[in-house]
Amino acid sequence: MDNIARPRYEFSCYQNILKRLRADEQKLNQDAKIPFLLQEEDVRYLVEVVWASCSALSACSDLYDLMLVRWERWKDWSPWNCILLSKEEISAHREVEDVHR
């Protein structure tokens, strides 16, 4: 019998990020598939490992204020086309026509 204590992770903040991502992508592209294939653990990895649990612009680390959004808005959302930003930064990011300029 396996009775070893295991660490328990709190996923509610990642579940929140995932719900907002799915809702946002559903509005932009009703055929979006990748956000609906992700699990909370995948979002946790993206947020903690790739983005170091903070906004790419302001270093905000309030996980309940952060969202994963498209880096290049004309391309579908994917883990390789996303950026972690605070809710306030998202509106400014969406106004940028070409992120490479």
Image (cartoon, helix red, strand yellow):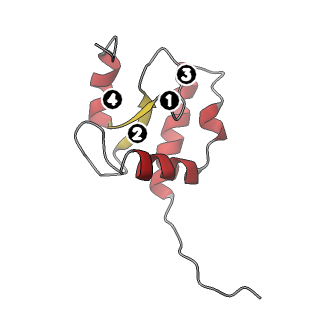
Q: CA distance from mark 2 to mark 4?
A: 8 Å
Residue at left offset 43%, top offset 37%:
68
Task: Give the position of the N terminus as an image quadrant.
Answer: bottom right
Q: CA distance from mark 1 to mark 3?
A: 12 Å
Query: Can you say whether 81 is above or below 48 in the image?
Result: above
Q: Earlier in the sequence, mark 3 or mark 4?
A: 3
Q: Earlier in the sequence, mark 1 or mark 4?
A: 1
* Residue occupied by mark 1: 24
Query: Can you say whether 87 is above or below 10 in the image?
Result: above
Horizontal placement of 53 versus 92: left or right?
A: right
Q: Amino acid at mark 2?
A: Met
* Residue occupied by mark 3: 76
* Residue occupied by mark 4: 90
Q: Earlier in the sequence, mark 1 or mark 3?
A: 1
* Residue occupied by mark 2: 67
Horizontal placement of 75 versus 36: left or right?
A: left
Residue contact at pointers 2 and 1, CB within 8 angstroms = yes
Question: For this rendering, which residue is in front, 60 or 99?
Answer: 99
Residue at left offset 58%, top offset 20%:
29
For this orientation, the residue located farthest to the left is 58
Mark toward the viewer: 3 or 4 = 3
Image location of residue 95, percent across then percent down = 31, 16
Q: CA distance from mark 2 to mark 1?
A: 10 Å
Q: CA distance from mark 3 to mark 2?
A: 16 Å
Query: Quick one: label 1, few (<14), some, or many (20+) residues within 10 Å?
Result: some
Question: For this rendering, which residue is in front, 24 or 71?
Answer: 71
Residue at left offset 44%, top offset 18%:
73
Helix, strand or loop for disc 3? loop
Helix, strand or loop for disc 4? helix
